[in-house]
Structures are given as C-alpha cells and as structure tokens.
Image (cartoon, rainbow, N blue to C red):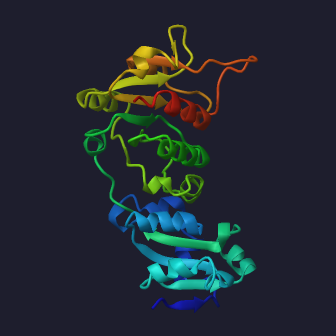
C-alpha cells in the first residue's frame, strides 16, 4: 500500500526531485542509469506506466488522492506519495501542476539506431530541434501518423523533459527514439547502411513537391527536419537523397517545424 505523506517542510531533501533539481541534474548525464524524469498529468503518467517505466515518487494535490490520482497510486504501491493543497504545491514546484499530479520516474535505457531501423519503413530525423513544445508535438504526430521511430541529433531537446512529454500526450513512451552519436556524417551513413533514403525538408531551387511520386514510393524513407528558425544546415541538405518542399500560398514561406512534420508524416507515410 502506498505511503501518503503530507508535506510540512518545503525544504525537505526528498522533495528535491520536484523542486530544486534542474532538467540536466535529473538526467544525470554522468551516470545515466541513475537519471530520472518528471511525468506530468495522469494521462502521461499512465502512458509511462503502460510502457513499463518505474515510478520513484508521486506528488499530487490532496484532492486527487481519491480522484484522478487514485488509479495511479494503486499502480505505484512502492512509491511515496507527497501531497498538499494546490497553492502549497505551486510554491514548491514554481508552477501550477497540470491536472494536479507529477511522477518522478527512472529514465529508460535507449534502443540502438539499428534496433529502431531494423524493421522500420518511415522514420523522422530531427536536427537541432530545441523547443520542448515542438519536440512533444512532433512525437504526437509521429505516433498518430504511424512513424516507426524518431532519431535525434545530439543537439536536440530531450524528449523526456516535462513539457515535451506532456505536449506529446505520452507518445514519447510509445514511439521508439534515440540519439545519433554523430550528425550529420555518421548519422546519414547509418541510415544508408540500413537501406534508408533521406528526404530533407527544405526550400531550395532544386526541391521537389512533397507529393512527388518517387519520394512517396521509397520503401524505406527518413524524413529529415531542421531546427526552429534556420531549418536544416546546408551540408545536411546537400547530403540527403531528396530535398522536399511543402507548397505554400499567400506569401508564406515556411511552417513551424512541428506543423511541417505533421504534413510530411501524412503525405510521405507510404503504403
């Protein structure tokens, strides 16, 4: 049976997970096996539990213990449950809890690039996408539109950052993902070794429209999307097999990367 603990001291060290550790400290880059992340909202926490992730501790508003949080508590019998009123928890964390529930969880091990690509047909490749909201939205589109995986350059935002996981609606626990150790050279080579052709989403003079039959017919395709603002590096575009554009109207020259991703995932989903 879970231990429900009423918070009486905001400075208690056991609350550091929720209040005083930065995202980098939570990740514990020097010892990844000791890293944790924070899942926010019952839906996201349930998705993480469904994926087999291990809870460490819960923080929830008192009113949710027998409400929205009851099922989660039942599924986490060994995790302490810290509780208090909304204002108290807001003072502790520095923000208003979405749906009043947080769960600190152990970070999962990541699959290898080869594991993700082995049986995949369509993958997303993200280069330098740093905004947590965009990362979460891209994962949600990837899950909804049937992509087999998401591969990230080393400079991308961590998909397990609290906001990214929440915006993804928990799909970061459903779509396989990992980081390239090197990008673009080593990463593009790995994609080719695994039989993938690459489609860079960019506006260039030699780009083809997104409904190009040859691109859509590729049996294995990696859709490559670039950072907010600047898009893909020129060297990345030059190294890809295709350069693909989304036709625009009314003088609009580009879409937000998460919107462009959704369009590309749908149009290039294959058969």
Q: Which residue is at 51% across, 58% downward? A: 170
Decide if residue 106 is on the left or right side of residue 9: left
Quarter of the image with the N terminus is bottom left
Between 149 and 204, which is closer to the camera in this rendering? 149
Between 246 and 39, which is closer to the camera in this rendering? 246
Where is residue 215 drawn, in percent x and y? 42, 19
Where is residue 271 drawn, in percent x and y? 40, 30
Tell me if residue 36 can be seen.
Answer: no
Q: Which residue is at 36% across, 61% downward? A: 108
**Furthest residue in direction front, as rendered:** 271
In the rendered image of this protein, does residue 38 appear above or below residue 244?
A: below
Q: Which residue is at 47% across, 17% downward? A: 243
Decide if residue 86 is on the left or right side of residue 149: right
In the rendered image of this protein, does residue 120 appear above or below residue 65?
A: above
In the rendered image of this protein, does residue 217 appear above or below residue 70?
A: above
Where is residue 5 drawn, in percent x and y? 57, 90
């Amino acid at each position: 049976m879970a231990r429900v603990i009423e918070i009486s001291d905001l400075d208690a060290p056991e609350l550091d997970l929720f209040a005083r550790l930065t995202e980098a400290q939570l990740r514990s880059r020097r010892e990844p096996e000791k890293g944790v992340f924070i899942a926010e909202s019952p839906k996201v926490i349930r998705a993480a539990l469904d994926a087999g992730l291990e809870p460490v501790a819960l923080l929830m508003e008192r009113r949710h213990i027998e409400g929205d949080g009851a099922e989660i508590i039942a599924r986490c019998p060994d995790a302490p449950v810290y509780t208090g009123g909304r204002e108290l928890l807001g003072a502790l964390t520095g923000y208003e809890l979405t749906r009043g529930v947080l769960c600190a969880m152990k970070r999962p091990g990541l699959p290898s690039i080869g594991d993700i690509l082995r049986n995949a047909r369509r993958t997303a490749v993200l280069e330098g996408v740093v905004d947590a909201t965009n990362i979460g939205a891209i994962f949600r589109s990837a899950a909804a539109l049937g992509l087999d995986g998401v591969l990230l350059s080393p400079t991308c935002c961590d998909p397990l950052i609290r906001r990214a996981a929440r915006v993804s609606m928990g799909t970061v626990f459903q779509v396989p993902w990992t980081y390239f150790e090197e990008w673009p050279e080593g990463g593009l080579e790995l994609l080719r070794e695994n039989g993938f052709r690459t489609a860079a989403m960019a506006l260039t003079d030699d780009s083809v429209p997104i409904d190009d039959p040859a691109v859509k017919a590729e049996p294995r395709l990696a859709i490559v999307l670039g950072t907010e603002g600047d898009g893909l590096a020129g060297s990345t575009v030059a190294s890809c097999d295709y350069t693909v554009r989304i036709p625009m109207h009314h003088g609009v020259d580009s879409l937000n990367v998460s919107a462009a991703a959704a369009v590309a995932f749908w149009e290039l989903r294959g058969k």
